[in-house]
Image (cartoon, rainbow, N blue to C red):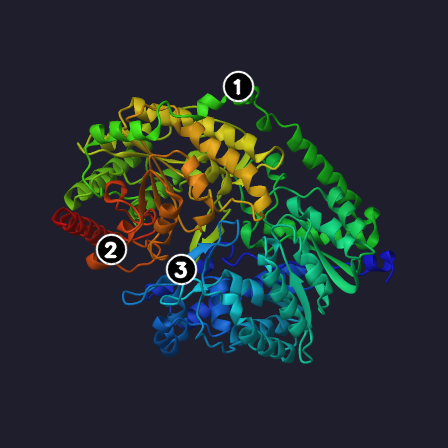
Amino acid sequence: MTAKSAAAAARATVYGYPRQGQSRELKKAIEGYWKGRVDAGALRATATELRAANWRQLAEAGIHEVPTGDFSYYDHVLDTSVMVGAIPERHRAAVEADALDGYFAMARGTQDAAPLEMTKWFDTNYHYLVPELGPDTVFTADSTKQVTELKEAVALGLSGRPVLVGPVTYLLLAKPAPGVAADFDPLTLLDRLLPVYAQVLAALRTAGAEWVQLDEPALVQDRTPAELNAAARAYRDLGGLTERPKLLVASYFDRLGDALPVLAKAPVEGLALDFTEAAAANLDALAAVGGLPGRRLVAGVVNGRNIWVNDLEKSLATLGTLLGLADRVDVAASCSLLHVPLDTTAERDIEPQILRWLAFARQKTAEIVTLAKGLGGGTDTIAAELAANRADLASRAGSALTHDPAVRARTAAVTATDARRSQPYPERAAAQRAHLRLPLLPTTTIGSFPQTTELRTARADLRAGRIDSAGYEERIRAEIGEVISFQEKTGLDVLVHGEAERNDMVQYFAEQLTGYLATQHGWVQSYGTRYVRPPILAGDISRPEAMTVRWTAYAQSLTTKPVKGMLTGPVTMLAWSFVRDDQPLADTARQVALALRDEVNDLETAGTSVIQVDEPALRETLPLRACDHPEYLAWATEAFRLTTAGVRPDTQIHTHMCYAEFGDIVQAIDDLDADVISLEAARSHMQVARELAGHGYPREAGPGVYDIHSPRVPSTEEAAALLRTGLKAIPAERLWVNPDCGLKTRAWPETRASLENLVTAARTVRTELSAS
């Protein structure tokens, strides 16, 4: 096919779409089901309606081939475990008794069975449920979900393309099941898994699938020759099947590197590649292997992870270069649109001109369709769209919001000394012990306490004008008083004020900093039914006034025990926002760090002796390629130190991280120079404690003993057992006792019981230590 005919054949598609609905109908239906207010039939009906609404919207916008199977009640990797029959033994009876309840039991756990481990999906803030596999795992095909959803789309008269997590990525994301040797490699199960995929593919072909998309994002990471050989074998075998649809193998989030020649040689009909940001290297690599003659290329030229409008002319230039490298070039976003909000038109509080800088899922869909039209028909066919796009890009580039000379001058004046504590850790630790006088195995929480219906109602009433600020603040004071009283009665050693006034750990600060925009409806799935509204970091950042001092000082006035000041760190403020793409991330991080440094110093001046600066996103934001790690970790750790280095030696700096793989950034954790770090450890059975010990981490640490992402209450003995495991890696004088994460999403009854058990466990183990 000539370049001209390839352009004429260009079509628009997407890899996936937001699941929740315009008003988060899916979240409400699922949580209603958990509480017994919604039955299974009503939940399934809501899901069916949402899928149909998504497909119709995509088709009406001009998408030629809609994705199916990407919809999920909780997580698409968990759906894949169900599809291949990889059900943990502890959940098998529940799944066999009721598939839906068993599914949610795997995701959330029950009082008798722990859930699957949860961690970050590559370098995003989406969380997936980690498959548990072992040498005895038996895979069995269950294509019910995938076939049902394809048939729904076909019944609407649409061309549907089922989307599956690819077999190689599925195994690379898996971990050894409990009781299985830690060195077991799930990839050794590939030959056992491929026949199950073959059965699913055959079922989808029978159901009417012309194409099936197999997502292999794990191949954009550094892979060993053995792993690349496994990928080659997988697609040789799947491509060699006779009873199958056409196969589109998709990668995203970065460049494919050595995996691109492997997939280019595979006997599949198409590849979907990311051509944004770092992944732009895919273009040169594709040309180097001679392109994809006779096959389909789906070009991800619209950023599926950020919310800025696409530079249409730049994307058209990329697409034009790709013509001639494949038999057919189609246009798509770089990844699933799951990672962005649904629609900018719902936003009423962002100034209209600024709103034109933004593109959520529906706007990105329109960009994809426009680019496909321009690629097929020439730029004259989209002249109006190109002119409007140029005007929007120029408006953003010239805006006063994006350039504050005072902020830039302060950032430019930063020196290495500004990011160093005045004394080394051993001297600080001695000063802090003398000042704080904490017991062995001190107990604390991570920061937030349950956000009750009453609190959320009070916040909504304030926004709607139903109560005034005085009435709202009285409600916050009462809640802080209750939280402090509970912690004192329970016996916690370092208290928190509970964050009753905070809507979100990033949004709360973003709303008080210059340079940020807040959305009203910009919901994005983090995990399960947990949705967040990432703020938009659009311009230069500064702090006009103190943000947390008032309520922290009030809480401290109610107790003689230390109350932690609670802040969100600079890397997390970037990672959990939609961050500006018009300057290096390092520059933006320093701006945020300096604003937070002012807050840290004000907290100390107000009498706060313990200050926690959370950085749960430090690992999440780690680039997917090892060669890119040093530069990122250098500016990321510097930004944390810049935030915290201005305090006295006897002020104890804490940080917190959760739900990520920490083993490969232990040196960076050390480089933060925090006095205490708390980390998720309950679901991963204290793995991080062993990793810290292996590194020789010299400071204090609190690996979590209470999994807060499950409604189950850990027993005293369960928490004590985890503590004893932690003590095998971390000396008692440096070990803290705490939950995995904040308690915002939990209910009060389970929170009370769990924290009471946590404190009792700490006392039990203290007694054991004193007797030994």
Query: Which percent across, then down, holds residue 650?
Result: 28, 26
* Pointer 1 local density, CA inside 10 Å: few below 14, some 14–19, many at least 20: few
Task: Using the image, determine if residue 583 lies above or below residue 36.
Answer: above
Q: CA distance from mark 2 to mark 1?
A: 48 Å
Can residue 539 be spotted in the picture? no
| Label 2 sits on residue | 719
Residue 451, which numbered label? none
Q: CA distance from mark 1 to mark 3?
A: 44 Å
| Label 1 sits on residue | 413
Of callouts 1 and 3, which one flags the residue occurring earlier in the amino acid sequence? 3
Q: CA distance from mark 2 to mark 3?
A: 17 Å
Query: Which percent across, then down, holds residue 487?
Result: 20, 43
Task: Using the image, determine if residue 646 lies above or below residue 244.
Answer: above
Of callouts 2 and 3, which one flags the residue occurring earlier in the amino acid sequence? 3
Residue 117, which numbered label? 3
Left or right: 287, with 250 as reference point: right
